């Protein structure tokens, strides 16, 4: 059959070609829309892929490698530390502390050896853990170091002239008298800069528990050697009569190291209930025994102090908490004047571990006090919990039904 157009005329070859082309276009436009969009999206994604080559390719690889290295380093930091690593770190820290203490001790010995006695003053530095739950070794004041406060000008002059092998000329000797050396304010002012030294001294006396105590929770106290010797003598006397104190405490029903306020409260209750005129079942002997026990425990003899400050004759001891001392003011002629303590004095420490007796004595005392305090706190907590439980049970109990 001959193909004809709309007018009935036969189609030529060129007409057929045009028709086929027109049909092809119609067929293309009739392609499903979804298929067309899918093909277009794939083409777009292919076009969007960046072409990385040359320097850009090397830079990308370097960045990926750097990121992988950083991730590996972060993972290593989070990995658990081995026991060997912990032991090595602990030994390194302990060695560093011993080195600091050793250097301080040598400097202390030089000052005491080379300076005149009236050019320096000696004190005892004690430390306490100021916390609701202190470590046992520091639950009360623990003496940790001797502290020498010296005339800095005289000390520096002697060091210089000694280094050049000559004596100090008379005109250069402008020593400050011992009464002019305000040791306690000087120690207060210097202590923040001697943090490592103070912690090292405490570490050698109290042990590794100190490293877990924040420095901000440590309190420091100072007294001169004479005052400290009174405390030592009183505690030794207390230990020698420990059986007497134990017997007195048993008579009152308390512990020998209980707080004085608690002992006094128990005593008042006993003295009222056991008075022969009020209690016919009591006796004069029992009443007198209670009085004698309280007199012994209440520090009538100046030996049974339950706190470090309470040891010895309280009127003669000069122990001072550095928190109560102003570092920049000193007394002179009854007036208060600003003191440039940093430029006038040299402050150096020496560990009290050289006196084995002192370390053993006061560590044992504090551990004993700490154990008793912990036991007392535990008992109080248990009693409070039982009381709270009893109240809750009473509240929860059903009301009686009226008959």
Image: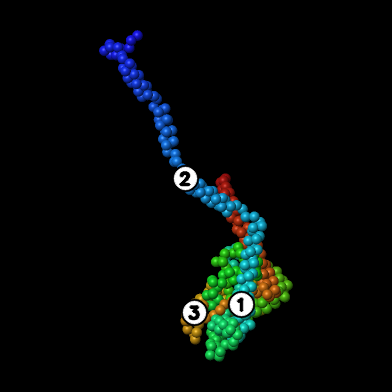
- Dividing the picture into quadrants, the one containing residue 380 is bottom right
Left-right relation of 293 to 48: right
Say which of marks 3 and 2 sits in front: 2
What crowding class fits label 3: few (fewer than 14 Cα within 10 Å), some (14-19), or many (20 or more)? some
Residue 107's disc number: 1
Identified at 61% across, 53% down, the residue is 80
Secondary structure of the residue carrying tag 3 is loop
Judged from the image, the secondary structure of the residue bearing numbered disc 2 is loop
Name which of mark 1 and mark 3 comes first in the sequence: 1
In the picture, which quadrant includes the N terminus? top left
Compute the Cα span from label 1 to label 3.
Answer: 22 Å
Element assignment for label 1: helix
Provide the residue designation for mark 2. Answer: 54
Q: Residues within 10 Å of mark 2 (few under 14, many from 20)?
A: few
Expressed as whole percent of the image width and height from the top left, the position of residue 139 reads: 62, 67
Tag nearer the camera, 1 or 3: 1
| Viewer-nearest residue: 246 or 61 | 61
Which residue is drawn at the image coordinates 55% and 90% (left, top)?
Answer: 170
Which residue is drawn at the image coordinates 59% and 79% (left, top)?
A: 148
Q: CA distance from mark 3 to mark 2?
A: 68 Å
Q: Earlier in the sequence, mark 2 or mark 1?
A: 2
Which residue is under mark 3?
340
Residue located 69% across and 76% down the image: 236
């Amino acid at each position: 059959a001959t193909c004809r157009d709309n007018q009935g005329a036969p189609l030529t070859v060129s007409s057929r070609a045009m028709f086929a082309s027109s049909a092809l276009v119609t067929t293309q436009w009739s392609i499903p829309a979804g298929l067309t969009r899918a093909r277009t999206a794939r083409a777009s994604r292919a076009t969007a892929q960046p072409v990385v080559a040359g320097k850009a390719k090397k830079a990308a690889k370097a960045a990926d490698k750097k990121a992988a290295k950083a991730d590996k380093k972060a993972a290593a930091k989070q990995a658990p530390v081995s026991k060997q690593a912990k032991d090595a770190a602990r030994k390194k820290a302990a060695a560093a502390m011993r080195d600091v203490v050793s250097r301080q001790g040598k400097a202390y010995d030089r000052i005491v050896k080379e300076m005149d006695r009236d050019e320096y003053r000696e004190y005892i530095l004690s430390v306490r853990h100021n916390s609701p739950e202190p470590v046992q070794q520091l639950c009360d004041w623990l003496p940790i170091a001797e502290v020498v406060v010296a005339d800095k000008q005289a000390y520096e002059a002697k060091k210089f002239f000694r280094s050049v092998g000559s004596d100090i000329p008379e005109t250069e000797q402008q020593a400050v008298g011992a009464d002019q050396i305000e040791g306690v304010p000087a120690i207060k002012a210097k202590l923040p800069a001697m943090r490592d030294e103070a912690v090292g001294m405490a570490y050698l006396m109290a042990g590794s528990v100190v490293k877990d105590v924040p420095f901000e929770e440590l309190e420091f106290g100072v007294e001169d050697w004479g005052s400290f010797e009174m405390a030592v003598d009183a505690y030794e006397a207390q230990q020698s009569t420990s059986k007497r104190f134990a017997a007195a405490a048993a008579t009152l029903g308390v512990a020998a190291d209980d707080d004085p306020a608690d002992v006094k409260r128990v005593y008042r209750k006993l003295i009222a209930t056991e008075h022969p005129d009020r209690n016919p079942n009591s006796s004069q002997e029992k009443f007198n025994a209670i009085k004698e026990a309280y007199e012994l425990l209440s520090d009538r003899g100046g030996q049974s102090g339950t706190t470090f400050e309470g040891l010895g004759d309280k009127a003669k001891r000069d122990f001072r908490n550095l928190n109560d001392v102003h570092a920049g003011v000193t007394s002179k002629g009854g007036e208060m004047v600003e003191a440039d303590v940093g430029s006038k004095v040299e402050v150096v420490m020496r560990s009290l571990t050289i006196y084995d007796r002192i370390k053993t004595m006061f560590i044992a005392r504090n551990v004993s006090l700490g154990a008793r305090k912990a036991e007392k706190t535990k008992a109080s907590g248990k009693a409070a919990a039982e009381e709270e439980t009893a109240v809750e049970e009473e509240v929860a109990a059903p009301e009686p039904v009226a008959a």
